Structure formats: C-alpha cells, structure tokens
Image: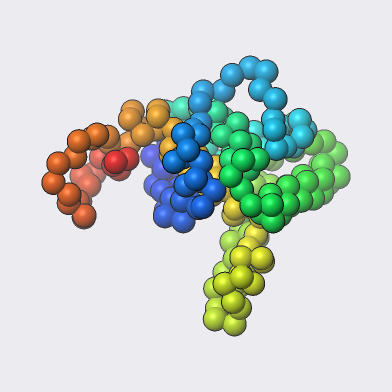
C-alpha cells in the first residue's frame, strides 16, 4: 500500500482520534519526537513496548514519507497513556494488549514483535476487524453513553492515540500535509485538486 492510500484511509479516523487524553497531551506540549536510542518506557513493560512499537510500525510504515515508529509515535503513546489517560482506560488498554499479545505468542510460538511483517499485518488486520465489529454493536440506542464507553474495544482506543500522535508530529504537519501558519480568511470547505495534500492547519 502506498503512503497516499494509507493517509487517505487513516485520515478518516482523525475525526474521532482527537480524544480527551490526546487533546490534553497536545495542549500541554507533549509531542512525538524522532525516536532516540535507549528510551525507557514509563507506562508499558519493556516487552509490551516492543509489541506496541511493532504494531505502530505495521499500521503506519515508512514509505515515501517517514513511518510512525521513526517519528517517535510509540514513545508519544507511552507518555500519553502514563500522564494523560484515565485509570480505567489505562487498565483497559494494558490488559487488552497483554491478553492479545499473550494469545498471539501462544499461537505463533514467538512474541508479536519477532514475527515477520506479513504475519504481523495479518494478525493486526484480524484484531482491527474484530474491534470494529464489536464497536458497531455498541452503536444502537439500547446502551447508555457510560455503558458504551465501558464496552469500547481497547484496540480502538490505542489506535486513536497512534493515529493522532502521528498526525500531530511536526514532520507530518509541516512537510507532508499542506501547512499555512497564517491562513487568512477562513474557508470551511475547500475542494482538493487530484494529488493535493490535505491541510494540517
């Protein structure tokens, strides 16, 4: 898949990727920085952080533009979860990832982060499809907002942080997306020419 196709797909999610913890993190100055060697995770265990980094790399790999991993998105997600995320969602995401990666390791005979990229992608697609199917079941009026929040799939919460962190990077905001720091007159709906980048500001 080419980068433009990836961006077209993931841009759909940025509408709900601006969650409370992500907004708080960005407004507080927390941002993804290019990955530095020797990072010590503060929310995840070392093993869990390796698995998250692998998931991030499969979701948004390097193609014509940098991938999420090299832009420091795993570190950003780690900090947002530790500092800006409610305890109940921390627990949901940590338990969800631990359970899922444990099941994958038992089935595959090795940790997720050690699998070949093709197998990682297949398993991620299965996880994503199952989470979206579960989320669609919560769309009806039968459940209250609190019940829907409690039953929301852990993967979609984590995915929101990954995509939001990726698009909040300086590299994406100023070099990949169209950027105009002083836009002048507000125009709410501007058609894009074929091949034109979306606006970041």
Residue 183 falls in image quadrant:
top left
Name the residue at the left extreme.
185
Position of 117 relative to 88 (above/below)? above
Instruction: Residue 75: tell me if it is visible.
Output: yes
Residue 194 falls in image quadrant:
top left
**Where residue 65 sits in the image (x, y, percent)?**
42, 28
**Where residue 57 sits in the image (x, y, percent)?**
59, 34
Q: Which residue is drawn at 78% across and 46% down?
A: 98
Position of 154 relative to 133 (above/below)? above
Instruction: Residue 125: tell me if it is visible.
Output: no
Name the residue at the front extreme.
28
Name the residue at the bottom extreme.
142
Position of 11 relative to 82 (above/below)? below
Q: Which residue is drawn at 41% across and 48% down?
A: 11
Applied colour scheme: rainbow
Q: Which residue is drawn at 54% across and 48% down?
A: 21
Q: In this view, does 135 lie to the left or right of 106?
A: left
Q: Quadrant of the C terminus?
A: top left
Tell which of 82 and 110 is nearer to you: 82
Q: Which residue is drawn at 33% across and 28% down?
A: 175
């Amino acid at each position: 898949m080419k980068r433009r196709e990836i961006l077209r797909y993931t841009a759909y999610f940025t509408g709900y990727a601006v969650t409370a913890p992500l907004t708080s993190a960005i407004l507080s100055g927390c941002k993804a920085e290019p990955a530095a060697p020797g990072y010590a995770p503060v929310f995840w265990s070392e093993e869990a952080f390796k698995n998250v980094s692998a998931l991030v790399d499969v979701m948004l790999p390097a193609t014509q533009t940098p991938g999420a991993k090299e832009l420091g998105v795993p570190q950003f997600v780690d900090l947002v979860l530790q500092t800006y995320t409610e305890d109940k969602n921390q627990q949901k995401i940590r338990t969800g990832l631990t359970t899922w990666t444990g099941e994958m390791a038992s089935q595959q005979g090795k940790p997720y982060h050690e699998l070949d990229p093709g197998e990682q992608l297949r398993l991620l697609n299965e996880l994503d499809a199952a989470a979206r199917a579960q989320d669609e079941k919560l769309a009806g009026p039968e459940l209250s907002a609190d019940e829907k929040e409690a039953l929301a799939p852990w993967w979609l919460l984590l995915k929101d942080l990954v995509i939001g962190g990726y698009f909040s990077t300086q590299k994406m905001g100023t070099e990949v997306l169209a950027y105009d720091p002083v836009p002048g007159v507000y125009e709410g709906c501007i058609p894009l020419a074929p091949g034109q980048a979306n606006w970041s500001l």
